[in-house]
């Protein structure tokens, strides 16, 4: 399954329903009421009116799905769902949506000991104190797998027996 498919799956069914319902209602209002009554559009064919009514409906559909994605994604990243959903909805010209994607936190990781979700930047679990990522034995700062020396203090890093714990992102 592609990464895009996995990301689309987090959008709630309610968001899909609202997007489809809003798009159909907007299409019907434009197609059967607003456009045929417009002075310059009275002479258009039904196909022209249909295509003209389709694009605002498609934009609304996509916008509602993006708002639904932001709501779900903010929750899985430990951010305020309500705040970011409102920012994305009401800050004009898509600036709120762009801000969300620029400022969003990284995905949460699950502690291998107790299963509590924590931020990727955390070195230790806030619940049980277990290591969420490998640390330097001298300065206790986060290291990355494969490092031979600590990038912060220069101390030698020996691989942990059995390898480093595998973390799951949620």
Image (cartoon, rainbow, N blue to C red):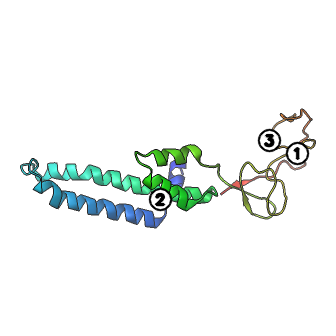
Real-space CA distance between mark 3 and mark 2, rounded to the nearest whole angstrom: 35 Å
Residue 113 falls in image quadrant: bottom right
Residue topped by disc 1: 140
Residue topped by disc 3: 145
> Residue 49's spot in the image, x, y percent?
16, 51
Counting residues from the N terminus, which is met first, the one under dot 1 or under dot 3? 1
Q: Left or right of 13: which side holds 26?
A: left
Tag 1 and tag 3, C-beta contact below 8 Å? no
Dot 3 falls on a residue whose secondary structure is loop
Counting residues from the N terminus, which is met first, the one under dot 2 or under dot 1? 2
Tag 2 and tag 1, C-beta contact below 8 Å? no
Q: In percent of the image, x 80 and y 49: which residue is there?
A: 133
Mark 1 or 3: the one toward you: 1
Q: Left or right of 4: which side holds 117?
A: right
Residue topped by disc 2: 68
Q: Left or right of 154: which side holds 30?
A: left
> Residue 155's spot in the image, x, y percent?
92, 35
Dot 1 falls on a residue whose secondary structure is loop
Real-space CA distance between mark 2 and mark 1, rounded to the nearest whole angstrom: 39 Å
> Residue 125's spot in the image, x, y percent?
80, 58
Counting residues from the N terminus, which is met first, the one under dot 3 or under dot 2? 2
Residue at the front extreme, as displayed: 91
Residue 154 falls in image quadrant: top right
Dot 2 falls on a residue whose secondary structure is helix
Q: Quadrant of the C terminus?
A: bottom right
Mark 3 or 2: the one toward you: 2
Q: In percent of the image, x 24 and y 58: which residue is there?
A: 27
Q: In percent of the image, x 68 and y 55: which residue is there?
A: 108
Front-lying residue, 27 or 103: 103
Tag 3 and tag 2, C-beta contact below 8 Å? no
């Amino acid at each position: 399954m592609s990464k895009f498919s996995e990301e689309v799956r987090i959008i709630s069914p309610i968001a899909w329903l609202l997007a489809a319902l809003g798009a159909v209602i907007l299409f019907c209002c434009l197609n059967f009421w607003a456009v045929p009554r417009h002075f310059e559009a009275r002479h258009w064919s039904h196909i022209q009116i249909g295509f003209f009514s389709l694009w605002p409906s498609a934009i609304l559909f996509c916008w509602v799905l993006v708002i639904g994605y932001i709501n779900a994604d903010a929750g899985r990243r430990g951010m305020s769902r309500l705040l970011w959903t409102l920012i994305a909805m009401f800050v004009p010209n898509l600036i709120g949506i762009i801000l969300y994607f620029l400022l969003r936190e990284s995905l949460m990781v699950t502690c291998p000991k107790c299963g509590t979700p924590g931020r990727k930047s955390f070195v230790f679990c806030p619940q049980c104190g277990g290591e969420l990522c490998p640390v330097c034995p001298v300065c206790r700062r986060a290291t990355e797998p494969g490092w031979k020396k600590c990038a912060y203090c220069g101390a030698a890093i020996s691989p942990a027996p059995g390898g480093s714990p595998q973390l799951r992102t949620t």
